[in-house]
Image (cartoon, rainbow, N blue to C red):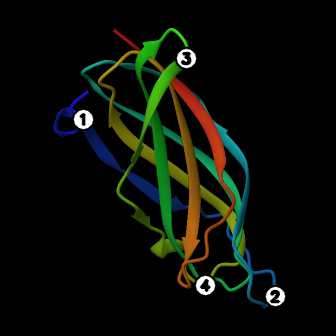
């Protein structure tokens, strides 16, 4: 697969209305959990979208960006299984979560699959001090 032929669209991070202050303060990495999404089938050569939500805690109230990484299947090899390429979507600013310590974040991304097969993805948040949260993982299929 040629890197210049891969079309990747940006992720959209949107804070939901279910944000609440915890009243705690401290310095620690943000945490995310409870990934929810419906995995649509993507079609090779078409731009499709995916969305969902997850819970977060950022005791400093300083969430900055959402990062989504997608593992793309490449050519299968007899001895080694399937090679995979990791593509990082452009980070999405989480301005609407500024100052919030706990809540739910909605997310979405647009992606054009270049090859059929299972595509795994990981997402995580980064705070203003560049501390990364844990990763949440999911997958979707792309068909011809």
Whether residue 40 can be seen here = no
Q: Earlier in the sequence, mark 1 or mark 2?
A: 1
**Residue 35 sits above or below residue 84 on the image:** below
Q: Of label 3 and label 2, which has the lower sequence position?
A: 2
Element type where label 2 sits in the image: loop
> Mark 4: few, some, or many residues within 10 Å (few <14, many ≥20)?
some
Disc 3 marks which residue?
81
Q: For this view, does 21 lie left or right of residue 133? A: right
The first of marks 3 and 1 along the sequence is: 1
Q: At 54% across and 39% down in the image, what residue appears?
A: 121
Judging from the image, what secondary structure is the residue with disc 4 in? loop
Of tags 1 and 4, the one toward the viewer is 1
The residue singled out by tag 4 in the image is 99
- What is the distance, in whole Å, between disc 3 and disc 2 at their CAs? 49 Å
Image quarter of the C terminus: top left
Q: Residue at x 66, y 65 (%)?
A: 133
Residue assigned mark 1:
6
First in residue order: circle 3 vs circle 4: 3
In-front residue for pair 82/120: 82
Nearest the camera: 7 or 83?
83
Q: Closer to us: mark 3 or mark 2? A: 3
Label 3: element kind:
strand
């Amino acid at each position: 697969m040629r890197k210049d032929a891969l079309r990747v669209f940006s992720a959209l991070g949107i804070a939901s209305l279910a944000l609440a202050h915890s009243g705690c303060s401290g310095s620690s990495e943000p945490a995310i959990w409870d990934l929810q999404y419906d995995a649509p089938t993507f079609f090779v050569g078409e731009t499709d979208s995916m969305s969902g939500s997850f819970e977060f805690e950022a005791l400093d109230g300083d969430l900055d960006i959402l990062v989504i990484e997608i593992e793309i299947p490449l050519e299968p090899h007899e001895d080694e299984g399937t090679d995979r390429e990791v593509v990082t979507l452009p980070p999405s600013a989480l301005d609407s979560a500024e100052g919030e310590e706990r809540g739910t974040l909605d997310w979405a991304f647009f992606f054009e699959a270049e090859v059929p097969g299972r595509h795994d993805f990981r997402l995580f948040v980064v705070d203003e001090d560049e501390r990364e949260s844990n990763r949440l993982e999911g997958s979707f299929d792309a068909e011809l």
